[in-house]
Amino acid sequence: MSSPVLLLSGVTREHRQGSSVVHALCGIDLAVHAGELVAVMGPSGSGKSTLLHIAGGLDTPTAGQVLVEDRDLATLSAAAGAAVRRRSVGYVFQDLNLLPSLSAVENVALPRELDGVRSRLARREAVKALEEVGVADLAHRFPDEMSGGQQQRVAIARALVGPRRLLLADEPTGALDSATGEEVLRVLRGRCEAGAAGVLVTHEARHAAWADRVVFLRDGVVVDQSGPIAGAESLLSTGGAA
């Protein structure tokens, strides 16, 4: 088997709160291969978002190793780390982070333009990504001219644009109705089947059912890994999702 697109080995993240230490993650081991979508579930405060931020190089572990496409993020310069995040990693944040002064197509094209892709090509790629999530007609609208669900789909298009090998999504369907949410998950699933690796944080068992594996976190520790349907039902039966 080829090397995983994402490899977390012994990852621990500690935060100091006054004189006390909070363990957000404790010795996490996780490998996600090309073609695989992994769902991460667990109660609020279990470390799900922290895991996602560390996986994408937005936060650094207190201990352990994070490899993205065999590159150890801890050994990279600031510029090289930023390049990995632009070229290899697509993020969907809970708070979207769309730039209000840019249109939808400009928001989606921006990571590619920052990476040196010619503007015309970046725009073409952006329009294709907007088409994938069903909002190509919003290409020239600004965020304040869109509904929350439309903004969410533009943010997802930005995560999908270009040849991203690792997709990290934090509750990507939160602002969407059921039908649109299912369509977005179908797009993410399709990208993984085309060769990307995906990590999806969700509290919805029906969304976790799209994944190949479900990883359950509790108090920063992986307490179980299982197939999607049985695993999600197990979490719900214990009242874990929050």
Image (tube, rainbow, N blue to C red):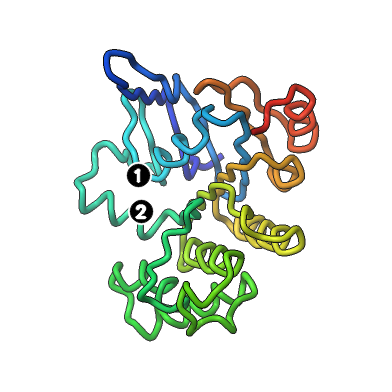
Residue 174 relative to residue 170: left or right: right
**SS for callout 2:** helix
List the residue tagged with mark 2: 85
Q: Position of residue 195 (x, y in %)?
A: 57, 56
Residue 131: mark: none
* Quarter occupied by residue 19: top left
Which one is nearer the viewer's eye here, 147 or 130?
147
List the residue tagged with mark 1: 58
Residue 146 relative to residue 15: left or right: right
- In the image, residue 151 sits, relative to residue 9, either above or below, namely below
**SS for callout 1:** loop
The disc labelled 2 sits on which kind of residue?
Arg
Sequence-first tag of 1 and 2: 1
**The C terminus lies in quadrant:** top right
Which one is nearer the viewer's eye here, 73 or 41?
41
Residue 208 relative to residue 20: left or right: right
Residue 206 relative to residue 214: left or right: right
Q: Position of residue 13 (x, y in %)?
A: 37, 26
